Amino acid sequence: MKKTMMIAALVALPVGLSGCDKKPEAPKIEAPNAAATADAMSSMEMAAGSKMGKGSGIVTAVDALTGRITLDHGAIPAVGWPAMKMGFSAKPDLLKGIAVGDKVDFNVTVSGSAGEVTAIRKH
């Protein structure tokens, strides 16, 4: 009986150790579609704290009285956002002279999944 157990252990040992050097593969993550909408924001995870980035896009809606602007913008790598159309808050004075259809460059501060335009300039 001892001999059988010893043989079984010697056979099992190399098989058990054969996977020890293998590292698990990282899960594959697909890049978001450039045509993603603001709905994509709900599924994006953001690190705690604020991040700042620069972007460019086209104004699709603006309300200087309430301090809201909607931009169809390109990717903003500094904050980990793909290209999308989304709304931002902004100081009302910052939005004076900005109109729907304007092509703009802007600075954004992101906290959680919300963004605030902190500077904006027409092309």
Image: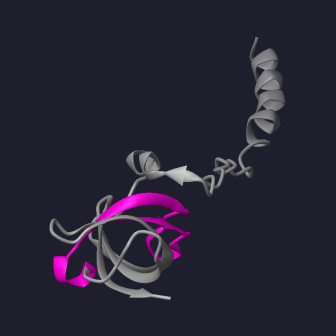
Look at the image and say whether residue 82 sits in the magenta stretch: yes
Residue 103 against residue 16 in the figure, above or below? below
The residue range painted magenta reads 69-95
Residue 82 is situated, as x and y percent measured from the top left of the image, at 54, 62
Q: Residue 67: image x %, image y %?
A: 20, 69
Residue shown at the point (75%, 17%) measured from the top left: 2
**Residue 66 found in image quarter:** bottom left
Q: Quadrant of residue 119?
A: bottom left
Identified at 75% across, 19% down, the residue is 5
Please report the residue visible at 66 percent of the width from the left and 50 percent of the height from the top.
Answer: 30
Q: Quadrant of residue 19?
A: top right
User: In the image shown, does 33 or 102 lie closer to the viewer?
Assistant: 102
Residue 13 rendering spot, x and y as whole percentages = 76, 35
Q: Nearer the viewer, residue 16 or 91?
A: 91
Front-most of residues 78 and 21: 78
Horizontal side of residue 42 vs 74, given as left or right: left
Residue 31 to residue 98: above or below = above
